[in-house]
Amino acid sequence: MEICKNTTDLKNAILHLEEMKFDQEAVLKVQFFQMYENSKPINIIKHTLSDIVNSPEIKSDLSSIVLGKASGYLAEKLVTLNSNNPFTKITGLVVEMLVSKNVIENASEIKTFGGKIMDKLLK
């Protein structure tokens, strides 16, 4: 800052500094409000879920998991056929886990194969 030689220059410098202070306070208030809003638990959860939903890797993994679990559940129902036999129920659970695991591991190949079948059916 330059040295003021008279009262007019000093008053102008004070006014300029007060304007700068006012502008900086306004910016600081906006930043504080944004930080306050972003630190609320509900907003943290919203941002996290938004990141999860918009992530292509997670979308792919999630679709593989859903496909695997649905296939496993269907296989378990086909094996047990509403049986009350404990051995059949245990066998159904083992089949469900094996089918789910294999479908999740090979989801991309299954999706490709399913796409080819759909293309042939639609033509």
Image: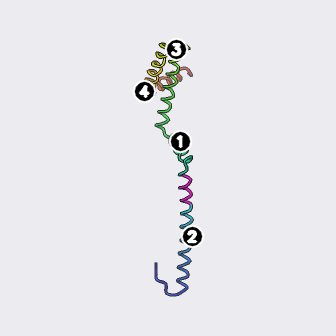
Say if 25 sits above or below 35 in the image: below
Instruction: Classify 10 Å Cα crowding around label 1: few (below 14), some (14-19), many (20 and above).
Output: few
Between the residue at mark 2 and the residue at mark 4, the CA separation in whole angstroms equals 60 Å
Say if 1 sits above or below 83 in the image: below
Between the residue at mark 1 and the residue at mark 4, the CA separation in whole angstroms equals 25 Å
Q: Amino acid at mark 4?
A: Glu
Question: Could you say whether the residue bearing mark 1 is in a helix, strand or loop?
Answer: helix
- Mark drawn on residue 80: 3
Between the residue at mark 3 and the residue at mark 2, the CA separation in whole angstroms equals 74 Å
Question: Could you say whether the residue bearing mark 4 is in a helix, strand or loop?
Answer: helix
Q: Looking at the image, do the residues carrying marks 2 and 4 touch, with CB atoms under 8 Å apart? A: no
Q: Which numbered disc flags the more N-terminal residue, 2 or 4?
A: 2
- Marks 3 and 2: which is nearer the front? 3
Q: Looking at the image, do the residues carrying marks 2 and 1 touch, with CB atoms under 8 Å apart? A: no
- Mark drawn on residue 22: 2
Magenta span: 30-38
